[in-house]
Every structure is written in C-alpha cells, then in structure tokens.
Image (cartoon, rainbow, N blue to C red):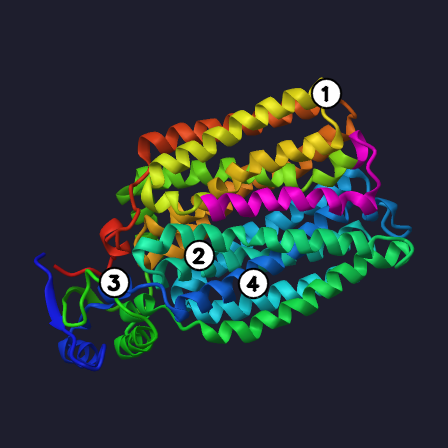
Amino acid sequence: MVPKAIRHGAAVGESASVSATAKQDNDGIVETSIPARLDCLRWGGFHTRVVAALGITWILDGLEVTLAGALSGALKESPTLQFSNFDVGLANSAYLAGAVLGALGFGWLTDRIGRKKLFFITLAVYLSATAATALSWNVASYALFRFLTGAGIGGEYTAINSTIQELVPARYRGWTDLVINGSFWIGAAIGAVAAIVLLDPKVLAPDLGWRAAYFIGAALGLIVFVMRMWIPESPRWLMIHGRPEEAHAIVDDIERASTRHSDHPADEVFPKVRLKMRSHTPLGEVAHTLFTTYRKRSMVGLVLMASQAFFYNAIFFTFALILTDFFGIPSNDVGWYILPFAAGNFLGPLLLGRLFDTLGRRMMITVTYGVSGILLALSGYLFSIGVLTAQTQTIAWMVIFFFASPAASAAYLTVSETFPLEVRALAIALFYAIGTGIGGVAGPALFGALIDTGSRNSVFLGYLFGSALMIVAAAVAWRYAIAAERKSLESVARPLAFVE
C-alpha cells in the first residue's frame, strides 16, 4: 500500500485529530498516523514518567521476590512452618505456576479490555496475596498465597511489556524495555538489605521477621496505584478498538510534552495506515497468527522464554539454599550476598541495553544467551570440585547474570515486538506461560531436590542442563531472530486489522 499522509499545523497534532475523525467511514475503517507520530518523538517527560511508573512496579516485584528467596532459611527455621528444602522449592514452583495461569488469563483480558484497566486489576491481586502470605500457617497456605501472588505478577508482565512497546519511540524501544525489566534488581537489592534487618533475631523473633517482610512489601506496593495514574491507555490499542478520537487526544498530549527528532520536522507529512476497527480478536485468529502465519517467530519466542525461565528461576530461587547448605552462611546474612548478585543483574541491561538498538537484536540476543550458558557451565564445574568460596561463588553469579539479565529481558522484548498489536499481550502471556511452565516451574523444585542430596556433582548436573538450554537458545536466535531494532511495530508485524 502506498502510505497516505496528513500535515500537522501550528497546533501540534490538532489537524491530525480532525483528519482522523473525518477519515473514519461507516464500515469502521479509520486512517491514522498515530504509529508514525509516536515513533518520531524524542525522549521527553512523558516517557520518563512511563519508565518511572513501570520501573517502580518491577522494583517492588524484585523486593517481594528477593525477600521470598532470602527468607528460605528463615522459613526452615520458623517454629510454625519448619520448611524442608523441598518445601521451599515447592512453594517457589507454586508462585511460578500462578504466574503461568495469571499470565494466560490476564493476557487474554489485556488484549480485550485494554492495558490500563489490567494495570489495576493485576496489582490488586498481587498486593492482596502478598499481604496474605504474611499470615501463612503451614506449607499449603504459604504455597496457595504464593500461587496467587504469582498470578498477579504474571498479569503484570503482559500489560507492562505491551505498554512499553506501544508508547516508547522505536529508536529507544529495546533499551527501555531492558532497563524497565532490569529495574527488578534494584528492588532485589532493597529486599536483600531488608532481609538482613528483618531476619536479625535481635530485631524480630524468628517467626515474625519473614511475616513483617511480606507485610512491608505489600504496603509499599500501594504507591504504585498512584503512579499508574500517569500512564494513559495505549493509543495503538484504542485506534483498533473503536476509539480513535481518544487515541488521537492522548497522542496530542504526548506531543505537547515532547519534541520531534530533527529528521521529523513539525510540518512533516506523516504516513498513515488504514485499519478496520474491532471489539476483540477471536481466539481462532490468534492461534492462526501465532502458529501458522508467524510460526518461526513463535518457535524463537518459546525457546528464548523456556531457556531463560529455567536458568533464572532454578538458580535464583535456590540461591539462599546454596549459600546456607554448601557454604555454611547463616540465613540472616544471605542478604549481603544478594547485593552484588543484584548489581550484576541491573548493570547488565543498563550498560548492554543500548547495543540491542545499535548492534541489533539478533547479535545481542545470541551473545548474551551464549555467554551466560558458557559461564554457568564453567562456574558449575568450579563449584563441583569445591574451589569456590561463598564470596567467589557470588562473584561468579554476578558476572554470569550481567549477561543473563539482558538475555532474559530480551525474551520478553522479542515476543512483545514481533507479533501484531491485536495479539501482543496474549502472545507475551502464552509464551511466558509455556516457557515458565516448561523451564520455570520445574526448575526450583528440581534444584531444591538436587540440593537436598548434599552432592555438589548433582547440583552441577542441574547447572549443566541450564547451560545447555541457554546455548541452544543462542543458536536459535542467531538463525531465526528478527531484526526489529529501530523499526516501527507496524513494520515488524502488520496489524491484523490492516486494510489495503
């Protein structure tokens, strides 16, 4: 199709809104320049507010999940719960199982009722379940509340990653996505420090410290409700779902707070697309899109998601158990070791993220997955022969996850930008669910069982398996990954509602 265009007058976006309304016909077809207008903008205050609001969500998630990992020793020592290593792994697997089901259910709703509404629904589920976890009285209740917490977080993944893709200009999209997802580790560092204080028996009794940790995490999460008021509904979602006037009004507001790049002057003619508005996308069309039209992209997404899920969840959720069982670190000191681990995880996306927008997705996904896998195998061997101390083991993990953290975030980036807008949230949910189901749910329970054997060689076998998954994912990415860097979403994957 040869793009049609509109010209903006002195009042930025004003003529665009009028033109868009005038171009809407009785068949529900609308001509819009919204994608081009959003992608031509320089970074502005609006984009900073989006990063802050979404990043703080992941900071709080990192706080809560890190507390869960750091509290493993406390749960084993709790007079009420008296968890075994298997119980800890089982509870963490329950959290991930909830995330899988939550992602699927909330992902479907995200594409149907919009990104913004789901922000508040998923956050309410997450915070309520986190507070309830503090009241757990046995293994079953703790696992149930962790399951519900995971359901809320699974929904957050779909809504947040969809919003990042649809609001951030194309030239910044990769780095922004990686940094927002990487901000999880700022929360991890805060959670580590909190664990040091709350698990100190001089501060709180052994059965109260871990409960206070969950209560505090839930209370802090209430801040996010206010910050989410800053984020509008996705204009791209609105323009397809029969609300083009709202979409253009939002873009007008964003433009007033931003400036265009020099290669997009104020009076530039913007390309337009013609879209057939729809209320929803049938599941049959979703399945055909994912598994027929974009079959290779689906394979890439699944491999990336599954490999990083096993790699990350198996290691991180049993981090504290390795330190306490093999290195004799007291449970209330585990937080000190999480700090450098978290630093590596945040610095990776921060420092390597821009390369995903310059060197490109294919190159950087291959490098980060491949290096992560090789380094894990090497450090696993050193662990198995007993040459590592708690300090050098932590340094090894810090280096490994400097590469693994942007690799894991790149899996979400890949899935969220290489499928059409109408199925984006459900695609994120589906591949997150399948990948986490395959790689994540089994990982913590498996590693918990391997650690229970007391054998370093058994744990090493688990590390080798995780390493092999990452190296295979690197090979798949090198062969099949899409070069989506600095391209509009609509050129990477044309909307299903597109009309010639």
Q: CA distance from mark 4 to mark 3?
A: 28 Å
Q: In the figure, is residue 32 to the left or right of 485? A: left
Q: Of helix, strand and loop, which one carries label 4?
A: helix
Residue 482 found in image quarter: top left
- Badge 2 is on which residue? 161
Q: CA distance from mark 4 to mark 2?
A: 14 Å
Residue 47 found in image quarter: bottom left
Let me know if residue 174 appears in the view.
yes
N-terminal-most mark, 4 or 3: 4
Q: Of helix, strand and loop, which one carries label 1?
A: loop
Dominant secondary-structure state across the stretch colored magenta: helix
Amino acid marked by disc 1: Val
Q: CA distance from mark 2 to mark 1?
A: 41 Å
Tell me which residue sits at (56%, 63%) in the image.
56
Marks 2 & 1, CB-CB < 8 Å contact: no
How many marks on residues?
A: 4
Q: Of helix, strand and loop, which one carries label 3?
A: loop
Q: Which residue is more in the foreground, 425 or 460?
A: 460
Outermost residue, front side: 262
Is 315 covered by the magenta stretch?
no
N-terminal-most mark, 4 or 1: 4
Q: Which residue is more in the foreground, 250 or 158?
A: 250
N-terminal-most mark, 2 or 3: 2
- Badge 3 is on which residue? 261
Camera-nearest label, 4 or 1: 1
N-terminal-most mark, 3 or 1: 3
Q: CA distance from mark 2 to mark 3?
A: 24 Å
Dot 4 surroundings within 10 Å: few (below 14), some, or many (20 or more)? many
